[in-house]
Image (spheres, rainbow, N blue to C red):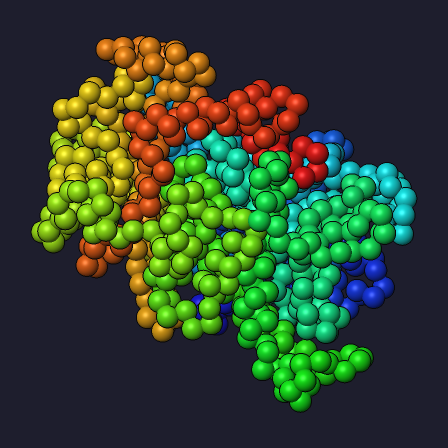
Amino acid sequence: MAVSESVPNPVSRRLKIFSFDPGLASQYEMAGISEITINVPWEDLQAGPIGEYIEVVDIDPASNALYRPVDLDDPKLLAQDGLAPSQTNPQFHQQMVYAVAMTTIGHFERALGRVALWSSRREYPKGGGYYEYFVRRLRIYPHALRDRNAYYSPSKKALLFGYFPIEVKDKFNTPGTLVFSCLSHDIIAHETTHALLDGVHPRFNVPVNEDVLAFHEAFADIVALFQHFSYPGVLRDQIARTRGNLANENILAQLAQQFGRAAGRGGALRDALGAENPKTGKWEPRPPSTTALDHTMEPHDRGAILVAAVFGAFSKVYHARTLDLFRIATEGTGVLPEGAIHPDLAKRLADEAARVAMYVLQMCIRAIDYCPPVGITFGDYLRGIITADHDINPEDEFGYRLAFIESFRQWGIYPRGMRTMSAEGLMWPTGAEAMQDAGVTTMKQDEIDKLFVALSDADARKTGSRRPRRTAKPIQFKPWDLEGDRLKTWKDIDDNSRALWFWLVEGAGKNLAKAAGLVLDDGKKVPATVFRRNGRIAVEVHSVRRALRRTAKGSTTSDLVVEITQRRAGYFDPEVQKAKDKQANLAKSDTGDFRYRTGCTLLIDPVSMNVRRVISTPGDILDNDELERQRQYIFEGGLSPNNAYQAASRDMSSREPFALLHRHGG
C-alpha cells in the first residue's frame, strides 16, 4: 500500500485572510490583529478554488481580464497556509472569498444539523409548471463589478463583488486607490449568508411586509458580526482595549469599516452599538428605543435595529457570565484599577465572550427552521429563537432566552397579537396544542405512522406534486444521510415532499393540515382567486428537510422541517378583488397584480412521529384582513418614500432584490 493511501485526509486546511479588511491592516496600532490564519474544513480542490460548495470564477469584465485561478492544493501553498494577504494579488482575493465563505457555511451546517444546499434553479416550460435543477456550487466572482456594490444574485446563484476608487481624502483614505469588497471579511460573510438563507427560505426574498428584506439584511449582518468572535487573537485584543467592556466602541461590533469610510460615511458601514455624532465627531452609544421601528422603514436601517437587539442580548449574558471574574480581579469592588487589564483576565474574558457569542450565533441560525415560510417578521423571528432554544435546551441555565426577550422588548420588537412576552407565551404551539385550538381531533399514532408507508407511482401521479417526475419508481418517506451526497439529499427532499403532500391532503394528516391553517377541499365555497391545480385547491409542500442537533446535555435530537404554502391572486383595487373572488373560475392567464401567500412550517420528530411544532402565518389563504394588510404595504411601502408603490412592486417582482438593496453601497 502506498503511503498516501494509508494516511487519512487532514481535518482542515489553514488559510491566511484579512481579519476585517485591508483598511485595518493599514493602521499601525492594528498591525498585530489585521491578518490571521483560520482553519477551513478540508476538501480536495481544483484550481479556482473549486470545491463541493463553491466555485470561484475570477473574470474582471471592466478590465477585460481573466485572472489565473489559485491552486490551494499546491504543496508550496499548503506548506505556508496559502498566499500572504495582499491587496494587489488576485489569487489572494480568490483565497480570501473561499476561506470566509466556507467558514460561514460551516457555522450554518453546525447550527442546522444538515448539509447546506443552495436554492434550486428553475426552468418554466411553455406548457406550465416548472422544473427544478440542483445547484451544486455557488459561484463567486471577486471582481465582477467596477462599482461600489456587492450582492448575492438569486438568478445567477452567485456572489458578485465590486471594486471602486476612493474619492474621499482623510486620515483613513487616499484618493484614487482602490477598495475591493472581496477583501472585506464582513461583506463576504454577509453575502454568503444571503445565499444560505435563500437556500432555506426562497420566499424570504419577496417583500410582503416591512420586515422581510430588513430581516434578510439583519440576519446577514448578525452572522458576519458574531463570526468575529471566532478569531481568538482579534477577540483578546479587543477585550484588552475595552478593558472587558464590550458595550464600548470596538471593531467586533462594526461591519465593513474600510468600505464605509471609503464611501464617505466617516466610519463603519454599520455599527451594532452606536455611531459617530456628526456635531462632536465622537462615537456615542445608541440607547435602545421602543419606538425606533415605528419610523424606520429602509431595510438596512430597520435591520440594524434587529442586529442591535441581538447584540444587546449577547451583552446581557456576557456581562452576567463575567461578573465573577470582575469581582475576583477587583477584590469585590467591581471597579478595575487604571491601566491595562492583566493578560490572564483578558484571556478569560475573551473565552467567555467567544463562548457566549458562538451560542448566540447558533441560536440565531437555528431559529430560521422555526419561522413561517413566507412573510417573516421580527416578532416571528423572536418566537423562533425562543422556541428553537427551548427545544434543544429546556433548562436555559444561563438565561439566554430571558436576555433575548428583554433586549427585544427594549427595542420595541414583539410578535403581533401576543398576550404575554414570557418565554412560555412566545413559544410556537405543539401539534397537539394547534389541533386543540383549531377544534379538530388529535391524530392517533397509527395515523402518524402512515406517513412512512410507501406510495405507488400511480398514487404519486395523483398528488399533483410540485415537480414533474423524471423517473417512474415507487417513492416513500426517506431519511437523510447527513454526511451523504448533497445531490442525493436534494433529490430526497422532492420525494419526501410528495409523500408528505399525499399524507396531509389525501391521507391521515388532514386534521393536522387544518390545524396548521391550510385550506383543503372540504366542500365549502372558496374564492376563485385561490390558486388551484388540477381543479383542486393547491397545497405546495416546498421541502422536507432533516435537522440533526446536539442538545445542551450532549444527546442528539432530530427533526423533519416541513414548509408548506398556498397562494391567492391579489389585486390592487379592493373592488376588483371582490369581483374576481366571486367569479366561478379565474382565467389561467389571470395571476392578479400580486400574490398573497400563506402557509406553515411543521417540525416533526421522525422517531416518535410527534408533531413538535406548528408555525403558521397570521392568517390563512381566505383571510381578507391579512390580504388587505399586504395590499396596504405595497401602496404605503417604505422601500422608497418618494414612490413607495413603484418601489414595492419592483422589488416584489425583481429577480435581483439584493442588487437593488445594495445599489448605494448599503
Task: Judge left or right: residue 532 versus residue 200.
Answer: left
**In the figure, 616 relative to 12: above or below?**
above
Is residue 138 visible in this depiction of the protein? no
Query: How far across and how far down the image is residue 638, in percent?
Result: 59, 30
Which of the image's four quarters has the C terminus? top right
Q: Nearer the viewer, residue 429 or 497?
A: 429
Marker count (numbered): 0
Query: How far across and how far down the image is residue 253, in percent?
Result: 66, 58
Which of the image's four quarters has the N terminus? bottom left
**In the figure, 84 relative to 623: above or below?**
below
Displayed quadrant of residue 24: bottom right
Displayed quadrant of residue 372: top left
Q: Which residue appears at 54% of the width and 57% of the height?
A: 407
Q: Which residue appears at 36% of the width and 11% of the height?
A: 589
**In the figure, 453 relative to 79: above or below?**
above
Query: How far across and how far down the image is residue 43, in percent?
Result: 50, 58
Is residue 322 visible in this depiction of the protein? yes
Residue farthest front in this picture: 419
Q: Which residue appears at 63% of the width and 73% of the height?
A: 350
Query: How far across and how far down the image is residue 15, in percent?
Result: 64, 61
Displayed quadrant of residue 132: top left
Q: Nearer the viewer, residue 642 or 7?
A: 642
Q: Which residue appears at 37% of the width and 20% of the height?
A: 569
